[in-house]
Image (spheres, rainbow, N blue to C red):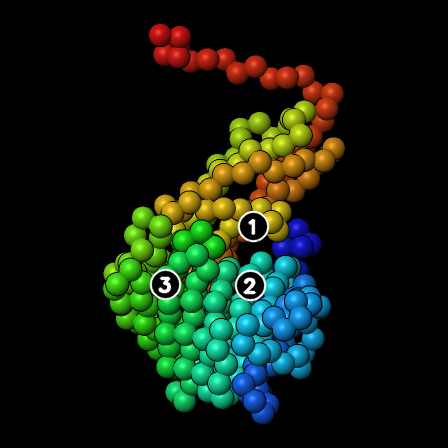
Amino acid sequence: MRRAAAIVATILALPACKRSPPAGPGSQAVVTAKNGQVQVLRAEDGTVADAKVGDRLSASDALRTGLGEADVAVDGVHMRLHEGSRLELRHVAKQAVRAKVRGSLESEVDQQGKLDVEVENSDATAHSEGGHFFVTGDGRGVVAVASVTGTVNVSGGGKSVAVSKGEVTRVSRSQPSPSKPVEALRRVLLNVQWPSLKETNKSTFPIAGQVEPGSRVFVQDEPVPVEEGGSFRTEVPLKQGKQKIAVVTVDALGRRQRVETIVLRDDSLPDMKVKKRLWQWR
C-alpha cells in the first residue's frame, strides 16, 4: 500500500534526533526536521500553517501531524512527533521542556537536559533526565511509556514507577496509576480477524483484532480506536473492484507490524445466507 509505505519511508528519511541543533536565543524550541503533513499552531494569534524546518516554537505553540513526522529540539532535549499526533509545548527553557502529547512522541534526552511529557486526557507524566523513550497516548486515557535506553520515571494516580531499558508501563481509565514495569514483548502483537468471505456486495468490510495494550492501530492509514485491553474493530469502506486492506500496529517501543488481505466488492453478487448450526436452533 503506497501510503503505508510512505509512513515507513518518512521515518527512515528523517535524520537522527541527536543531529538536531539547539534552539536559538530565548525560550524557544526549533523544528529541525519534517516530512509529510505537519502543521504548526500558533498560540499567540491562533494561526495554523504548514511547518517548516527552522520554525521556532514558544510555550503554548503546538505541532500537529497527519501522514508525516517532525523533529523538535532545544539544547539537550530532542523530540520526534510521529504520524497522527499532536504536541503542545507547555514550558521551554534552554535545557528543559515540558510538553503535552496525544498520539506518539519519541524522545532523546542528553545528560544535561530535562523533559516532562504530559498526556492528553490523563494525569500521567513521564520525566527523563537522560535516555531514549517513547510516550503513547490515545487521548482517551490509555497511555504506554517504554524505555529504549536509560530510565524514565512515570507518575499518575498518586504513584510513580521507574521504567528501565526495554521495559513498558501502562496507564488506563480503569487503572490511573502506572502499572509495574514489564519487559516488552519480543515480537509485535497483531492478530486480525478477517471475515471468511472476501467477495461481497456490501459497501463496508468489518474487521476486528487484538494488539498489545497501549499500541496504536491504523487501517488504510486511518487511526482506529483501541480498547484498554488491546482489542479493536472497525468497518472499512469499500470501492468497486479488488482492493487491498492493510492493518498496521505500532507498539509502545515504536515497532511496527502489518498484515493485509485482498477484498472484492461486486454489487452484482447475490446476498449470501449463512446456514445456522444445529445448536443455534435450540
**Within 10 angstroms of label 3, few (less than 14), some, or many (20 or more) residues?**
many
Quarter of the image for the C terminus: give it: top left
In x, y percent, where is residue 112? 41, 89
**Within 10 angstroms of label 1, few (less than 14), some, or many (20 or more) residues?**
some
Q: Which amino acid does label 2 sit on?
A: Arg
Comparing 107 with 193, the one in front is 107
Quick one: label 3 or label 1, which is nearer the N terminus? 3
CA distance separating discs 3 and 1: 22 Å
SS state under label 2: strand
Give the residue drawn at x 43%, y 56%.
Answer: 121
Residue 159 vertical placement versus 107 (above, below): above
Q: Which amino acid does label 1 sit on?
A: Pro
Look at mark 2 in the image and give the residue it sits on.
Answer: 86
Image quadrant where residue 62 sits:
bottom right
Look at mark 3 in the image and give the residue it sits on.
Answer: 124
Comparing 75 with 240, the one in front is 75
In x, y percent, where is residue 224? 53, 46
SS state under label 1: strand
Q: Residue 223 carries which label?
A: 1
Is mark 3 in CB contact (under 8 Å) with mark 1?
A: no
Residue 191 vertical placement versus 172 (above, below): above
Q: Which amino acid does label 3 sit on?
A: Ala
Label total for image: 3
CA distance separating discs 3 and 2: 16 Å
